Each structure stands twice: as structure tokens, then as C-alpha cells.
Amino acid sequence: MFAKKEQMTLLLMAAGSGSRYGKLKQFDDLGPAEEFLMEFSIYDALKNNFNHIVVITKAANKSFLESHLSERLPSTVKLDVLVQDIKDIPETITLDTQREKPWGTAHAVWTARNVIKGNFVIINADDYYGQNAFKGAASFIENNANPNAFALVAYNLKNTLSKFGSVSRGVCEVENHKLTSIIERTKISRTRISNHR
């Protein structure tokens, strides 16, 4: 008799509008077989024992993503594609807004509340993280015995800069190995970093 494998979920945020990029970056055909950027992250996650993929997207993209990803994922991997509906909020909250753009990451996680039952990792579908990020996340999940402990995979700022202009980055502040804040810094460039040394 085999023990049931614990579910490890990758939650992808793919409901953005690509306003800065000018189009939907998460659906650009980047790979040799026209893979999306998110597919590279999914591949890296599967290599590190993730077995449940949840994608949060817009209603217009739901059917397409379900079809596209289900054809490429192993049959052993569970796939859920969910629509981030601006009206789907907790019953205790009342909002009177004309907003059309989806709420942020916290609301996207709320959208997945009925399909995620255990540990999960959140990423943006239009960012590339590298296999080491998923290796570190999987190691934390597999070895963490404290249900109230959480982790953030972070990068040295200098390794995230572009040769082609400035970027915006969430800069983490840490005290005693605990995250105390994330502050978004804009217009960061290699030149500005060098001048502040």
C-alpha cells in the first residue's frame, strides 16, 4: 500500500493587464515550442515535486488556458484555472466601486480558497524565477514543522537589474531573519546602484 502524496500547489497570478509592457507578457511565445514564460516556471516547479497548478486569470482567458495547459501537463498533475472576479469578496466586506481592474495578490489568493487545501507557493506568471527558487520553496515546505512560519524567496538586488534601463523592485527589509517590510523602489538602475556605493 502506498501513502498518498502530499499536495504541493503552485499558484500563478495571470490576471494582469500588462499595462507597462504594452500587452499580455504572460502569453508571449518565448520557447522553442511556443511556450509561455509561465510554462518555464511550471516546469521548474514540477521538477521539485509540485503536483497541483492553480492559475488565476481573467474570464476571457480561462478556456484558452485550461486547454493550452492541460495538453502540456502530465496526467498526474492537477490543474485548476480560476477567474478573479472583482465581486467575489468576503461576505463581511461591502464595496461600492466602479473599479474594473482586478484587486491585488491577496484577492487572487482568496479566489483560490476552495481549491487549495495545503501548502502553496505564489508567483507571477510574467516573471522568471529559476529552478533554484522552486527548490528552495519545496525544501521549506517539506521541512517546515511550524504551521505559523512562512517564507519568501528573494534575490540580491544587483542580480535583478537590467542592462536596458531602470526597473521597479520590491526591496525587502529583514531583521533577525524575519521580513519586516517590502518597499517598492522605482527607477533602479545599475548606474544609480554604483553611484550609491
Image: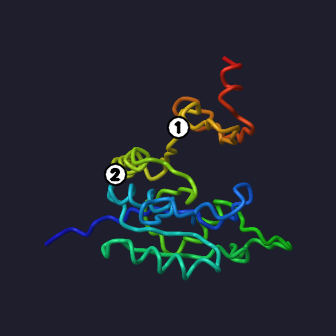
Q: Secondary structure at mark 1?
A: loop
Mark 2 and mark 1: span between their CA atoms?
A: 21 Å
Give x and y (percent) for residue 75: 31, 76
Please identify the residue farthest to the top as the structure is shown.
197
What amino acid is found at the position of numbered circle 2 in the picture?
Glu
* Crowd tier of the residue under label 1, counting other residues whose Cα lies within 10 Å: few below 14, some 14–19, many 20 or above: few
Q: Residue 155: give its label.
A: 1
Q: Residue 49: give its label.
A: none
Given residues 44 and 166, the one toward you in this image is 166
Please identify the residue farthest to the left as the structure is shown.
1
Q: Classify residue 56 as left or right of residue 140.
A: right
Given residues 163 and 168, the one toward you in this image is 163
Give x and y (percent) for residue 98: 86, 73
What amino acid is found at the position of numbered circle 1 in the picture?
Tyr
Give x and y (percent) for residue 111: 60, 71
Residue under the point 39% across and 52% down:
141
Given residues 183 and 62, the one toward you in this image is 62
Q: Given this view, does label 2 or label 1 mark the residue nearer the observer?
A: 1
Dot 2 or dot 1: first in sequence order is 2
Q: Classify residue 13 as left or right of residue 149.
A: right
Q: Secondary structure at mark 2?
A: helix
On-image quarter of the C terminus: top right
Give x and y (percent) for residue 83: 61, 76
On-image quarter of the N terminus: bottom left
Q: Can you say whether 58 is above or below 142 in the image?
A: below
Q: Classify residue 190 as left or right of residue 147.
A: right
- Judging by the rendered image, the residue that carries numbered circle 2 is 142
Residue under the point 57% across and 66% down:
27
* Residue 18 figure quarter: bottom right
